[in-house]
Image (cartoon, rainbow, N blue to C red):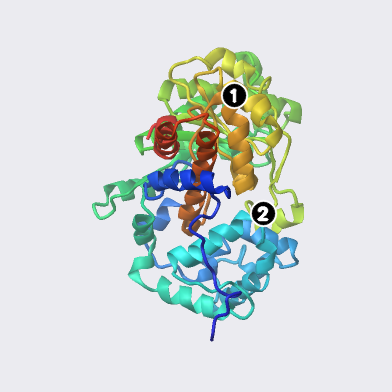
Amino acid sequence: MSITTAEALRLHPDRLLPTAPEVRSIARRLYDEVRDLPILSPHGHVEARLLLEDQPFTDPTSLLVTPDHYVTRLLHASGVQLDQLGVGQGTLSPTAAREAWRLLCQNWAVYRGTPVKYWLESALVDVFGLDLRPSAETADELYDGIADQLAQPTFRPRALFDRFRIEVLATTDDPADDLAAHAALRADPTFTGRVVPTFRPDKYLEAGRPDWARDVLHLGAVAGVDTGSYAGWVAAMEDRREHFRRHGGVSTDHSHEDVGTEPLDAAEAERIYRAALAGQAPELQTTALRRHMLLEMARMATEDGLTMTLHPGVRRGHHRPTATRFGPDTGHDLPLPGAFTDALRPLLDRYGTHPNLTLVLFTLDESVFSRELAPLAGFYPSVYVGAPWWFLDAPDAIRRWRSAVSETAGLSRTSGFIDDTRAICSIPARHDMARRLDAGYLAGLVADHRLDEDEAADAVVDLVRGRPTEVFGL
């Protein structure tokens, strides 16, 4: 088939860099400082078992479409059913995988203006060497081109890990996980990468959940601690955090509707805890217990040194019928307004100046960038502002974030880029996007004579290497 100009994919070498010629030339030089640096990914959702087993990816759909809710949600909004994309279907048949891929390509126009288009095009060109723009006409040729390459040893998970120059990759793990896959990877002399677990205790803190009592009893069994009491609950958490730390963990990750941290006295915490185990605690009390336990997590962080990351303000499973049928992380978790200043005050009163606390604050609410997050990070030595994630990890949102935060907190009080993805082939594209945008931002400061170019060069390298290394103890 002949390829017309309209059908060809071309990745412009200056994509995302400033358009003004004099600024672009500076940005090019700054980008050159970091374009080939290894990737540090301290928050993501690729599973360690994928790298341990190192099996070939089965098909293009299972690799690039089904696991990525960024991709599936816009198709769903355009009338494509999630089961047509393989969501909740387990291993896809060859026919189902191809049909799902065709749906992606037929609806390619819905991604115009989104970062998803940028990531997928980068994967097609840079990872698979394909320069066909997705469409109904090109769908099968693209599918076959990717499938042929996935059958090659050079496209297995470990080979891609090395090819993408991933130096550190963090997974996200349940506190009850035995982390056997991480242990096996660390013991495998044929794998030289670094994969670290992340402690994600959300479901064990939400005492109002229907399965909470069962889950905390299981956590206690895994920890070898009786969780029939509040003290046992706390001890089980401490035990599992240490288990993660021994397996290379560097951080804990917390996502609740808010970041309230008001303390309870010991007697009240015990009373609510026992009532929750019996299923008799009202919502106001279970919320109070979760806020108290989040404060306890900060106390534990000062003792074991795990970086504490908070990304609140998400209504999980917004569409109940979809959540019931397909489960979590299927594209309909939606942002809520954020509030940090007063909510975190009890935590910061106790631990905000503690030398062993590192607290990274993320938000999906742009209105708090300059009003709350930057001022907090501009005073408390423990606080850093997390990079834009999820709905905000897009070019214009990242530019707005960098501008809003830097004037108050500077560059050094930020976390470094967070790719937050299950889609391994999008990792290099996401980090490259961030590097280009930071080079462009710093080039603007140089052009405004607010920063010398040698300072900007140091800064852009620090954003890629220094910030994640320091903030996450890498």
As rendered, which of 328 and 119 lies closer to the eye? 119
Three-letter residue code for mark 2:
Gly
Q: In this view, does 425 lie above or below 376?
A: below
Of pointers 1 and 2, the one earlier in the residue sequence = 2
**Mark 2, secondary structure of its residue:** loop
Residue receiving disc 2: 331
**Mark 1, secondary structure of its residue:** helix
For the point 69% across and 24% down, the residue is 288
Q: How many marks?
A: 2
Q: Residues within 10 Å of mark 1 (few under 14, many from 20)?
A: some
As rendered, which of 132 and 332 lies closer to the eye? 132
As rendered, which of 136 and 349 lies closer to the eye? 136
For the point 53% across and 37% down, the residue is 447
Question: Which residue lies most toward the left here?
Answer: 189
**Residue 329's x, y, as percent?**
62, 52
Mark 1 touches mark 2? (CB < 8 Å): no
Residue receiving disc 1: 408
Q: Residues within 10 Å of mark 2 (few under 14, many from 20)?
A: many
Q: In this view, does 90 lie above or below 234?
A: below
